[in-house]
Amino acid sequence: MRKRLIFTLLWGSMFTSIYASDIYIGASTVDITPRLPVALMGQFHLRIANEIATPLSANVIVIESKEQKAGVDTVVFVSCDLVYIPSQILALVREKVSKLLPGFSVDKIIISATHTHTSPVLTDSTDKPAFLYKIPTQGVTQVNEYRDFLVDRIASGIVNAWEKRAKGSVTWGLRRASIPYNRRVVYADGEAKMYGSANDPNFMKIEGYEDHDIHCLIFWNNTGDLIAMSIDVACPAQEVEGDIRVDADYWHPVREKLKEIYGEQLVVAGWIGAAGDQSPHPIYRKGALKRMEELSGVSRMEDISQRIVESVEKSYAIVKGDRYQNPVMMHRSEVIELPMRVVTVEEYLESKRISKAAAAEIARNPGKADQLHARMTWYGDIVRRYQEQKVNPNPQYKTEIHIIRLGDVAICTNQFELFTDYGIRIQAQSKALQTFVIQLAGPGTYLPTRDAVRGGGYSAVCQSNLVGPDGGDILVDATLELINSMWDGEE
């Protein structure tokens, strides 16, 4: 295994013995839809939403195991219809919950995002890396206002789920359903582009793999009532990513359809698997797919949601009789150090030039700030990193990961937009029967493969990354070491 420095975050959970025990489950949903107008995050230009296409929600699933010998262990999953989870928000939620539930182990709280690009801006000048918009100071919900609202809502959802927890059972399943497309196109000269044209004589291939398996965890209470599902799809929620309305994207119709089938009490937590190079948008065969959409009268959004729902329905029908009331449960978490991607002199000079040019254009024409402010700060952040790198030539990046064993399955988290090949490596080498990968459980930046870095383009250039492929290898190794240690001594 590659050399790495590990800082244990949850010492108490590191040495939990393997005992089966009753599990207690609680679930809740809270509305996190912002007050309008609000600035949306996910594009380089400023978008102000004055309309809500669908509400946004945070969906909470709490699992607690109790065993006389092994003690108590917990995990709190919070899935949010957001672009990612800034570290500040996670810290504030944990602080809030610690006050509302004195003695609760708040380090067991995991918050992840579905990566919808039609949700509120979450960052301001206090956050790094910088990707900032010039948001009007009047007449628009401010970042700090939404942040305060969001923290209160998530904390209340966690408390509600915790207080409702009761003995229950769980099972798991997976089905294959094509949702994502790899969105990186490679040309004859080796260059790669996100959403590049495949209808080009120099087109050579699609860069990487696609993961079409849809994983689900299914939870019942002790009277056999279905109370929650977590569904893991290796595709960001970005079918309507360029819209100017607040929208939870495909997760909203998925939740609504599943509630129609299984009841309004159902809580549906959407997880995004390793999908940094994936998208719901087709790269080729676009004309044929558009024709089928028009002839069927079924939109792409409806089609995506229906594929997911049908997959979950089939999994449910197969596994519902194979429930576990006392599965082994273990929760381990560590903060690991990953080498930051080093900014070259050429990358520094290019970024400095582009950032200064954007700043000069904004100075000449302040109206251009809506289009250029994020570009200025995005490239400007590379200038900052290069200056810091001169003082510390081997910068390290600390990141929190969680590993949960629940019966025969493993659940692992990372903070990045993790390229799919990394997720496949984790799943292929995991000792678990089935492994769930949750990305964007934190402040995501892309984590590309070596092939991607060689090809370049958005998502694989240094401006898109804090951590490069060397760090990706360490992340995979650390995750697998923790997962597989939970199966030590078992055949």
Image (cartoon, rainbow, N blue to C red):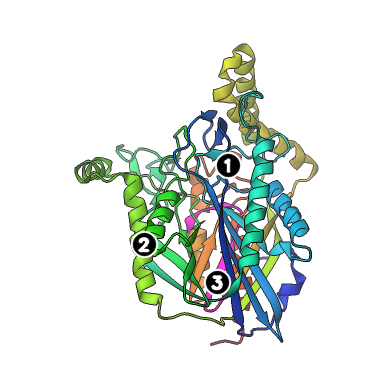
Q: Nearer the viewer, mark 3 or mark 1?
A: 3
Q: Secondary structure at mark 3?
A: strand
Q: Which residue bears the numbered disc 2?
A: 261
Counting residues from the N terminus, which is met first, the one under dot 1 or under dot 2? 2
Q: Nearer the viewer, residue 198 or 303?
A: 303
Q: Amino acid at mark 3?
A: Ala
Q: Nearer the viewer, residue 106 or 455?
A: 106
Q: Nearer the viewer, mark 1 or mark 2?
A: 2
The structure residue drawn at horizontal position 73% and vertical position 37%, both measured from the top left corner, is 126
Q: Position of residue 2 (x, y in %)?
A: 65, 66
Q: Secondary structure at mark 2?
A: helix
The structure residue drawn at horizontal position 55% and vertical position 46%, both measured from the top left corner, is 82
Residue 138 position (above or below residue 55): above
**Seen from this angle, which residue lies furthest left?**
295
Q: Which residue bears the numbered disc 3?
A: 410
Residue segment shown in magenta: 406-420
Counting residues from the N terminus, which is met first, the one under dot 3 or under dot 1? 3
Residue 282 position (above or below residue 226): above
Task: Find out whether residue 412 is within the magenta segment.
Answer: yes
Q: CA distance from mark 1 to mark 2?
A: 40 Å
Counting residues from the N terminus, which is met first, the one under dot 2 or under dot 3? 2
Task: Find out whether residue 395 is within the magenta segment.
Answer: no
Q: Amino acid at mark 2?
A: Ile
Q: CA distance from mark 2 to mark 3?
A: 28 Å
Q: Which residue bears the numbered disc 1?
A: 464
Q: CA distance from mark 3 to mark 1?
A: 29 Å
Residue 355: image quadrant is top right
